[in-house]
Image (cartoon, helix red, strand yellow):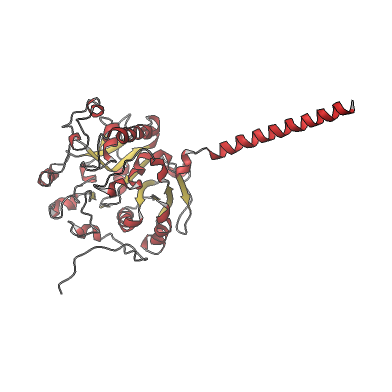
Amino acid sequence: MALLRKINRILLGLLVLMVCLLLHSTLLRASARPKLSDHWKSLGGAAQVPAVKASKANNVIPIIICASEERIGATMATINSVYSNTDARVFFYIVTLRDAVRLTRQYIGRTKLKGIKYKILEFNPMVLKGKVKPDSSRPDLLHPLNFVRFYLPLLDINHKRVIYLDDDVIVQGDIKDLFNIKLKSGHAAAFSTDCDLPSTHEMVRSIGMQTTYMGFLDYRKKEVKDLGINPRECSFNPGVFVADISEWKKQKITKQLEKWMEENFRHNIYSSAMAGGVATPPMLIVFHDKYTTMDPLWHVRHLGWSPDARYSESFLEEARLLHWNGPFKPWNYPAVHLDLWERWFIPDPSKRFSLVRPESND
């Protein structure tokens, strides 16, 4: 009898041990499982304020902009132009990679921008694994931050509507006018089409810039033909847009964009050698016939496509936003309309970012 009780105690002990091991294993698997939120990290800073509360979010204009280490001065010029031309309450969500977090915080804290309201978000480039194919024709277009615009709902923000800006733009108008655009029912975003402004047509033709879907997608591929999109249809530039986050989530825009990134990874239906690189084509496909058109003066672009093709000064004075999309950036040389960009440039206190300018002959 004593032996039987001893055996029962041993068996009970083994059973308890097995249950404990099973629970431990389950907890380990749960903690190791990746989450969507793991791709983003909110980072603190001296000039940074807490996340905007839901009750106050409607009174704030949220701006999403990226800051890469090699182009940090460009981001700060954009922020300065927005902040200086409005009396609205603007909140900047600055998305960057780990190597530029400290530099971003110092640049803001040690310059006139220390008064802005902002939050730094760190982007994990692993979210792009299996979605972006290496391409050497224009490596700058493959920078991980170039794809942040695809993942707006995953940002650590709490807003129904946001503005996304590329880092090579200057805002000359009051940003609240852009923010208050009325989006059509069922539209998750507003863009400016590439055929919308007669004043730009002459320059666009002179530099051979593509303004239709044919310039971005490979219509020899079955996947593209099956879309049924007319190759001569006007394209749009996704470097500046207003987004309805609720509608974006409802339509699962991010999932759709990822689908076409993966499709290109497998079948090469577009490439960075084409006009808009690899970030524009998925947007063109997913938002085809499903976006609101912005006032074209809120996105005067192509300033970076030629080192000598210029717009008239009177036209640029009317523009609300200027975009140096293309290889000739205003912080480098040669480039056009440098004065319009430089007036908003704030020198980097760390001296890492500097302008490229021709040497004086004096």
Name the quadrant of the N terminus: top right
Is the residue 288 above or below the residue 96 in the image?
Answer: above
Instruction: Tell me: 175 left or right of 274.
Output: right
Is the residue 296 above or below the residue 269 in the image?
Answer: below
User: Residue 59 sits in which quadrant?
Assistant: top left
Depth check: give the residue in front, 12 or 114. Answer: 12
User: Residue 13 sits in which quadrant?
Assistant: top right
Instruction: Tell me: 45 left or right of 65.
Output: right
Q: Is residue 287 visible?
A: no
Residue 232 spot, x, y in % from top left: 15, 32
Name the quadrant of the C terminus: bottom left
Q: How many numbered circles are shown?
A: 0
Residue 202 spot, x, y in % from top left: 10, 45
Instruction: Tell me: 75 left or right of 11.
Output: left
Residue drawn 31% across and 41% down? 133
Q: Is residue 243 visible?
A: yes
User: Residue 308 sits in which quadrant?
Assistant: bottom left
Residue drawn 28% across and 59% down? 344
Depth check: give the residue in front, 14 or 263. Answer: 14
Which residue sits furthest bottom?
Answer: 362
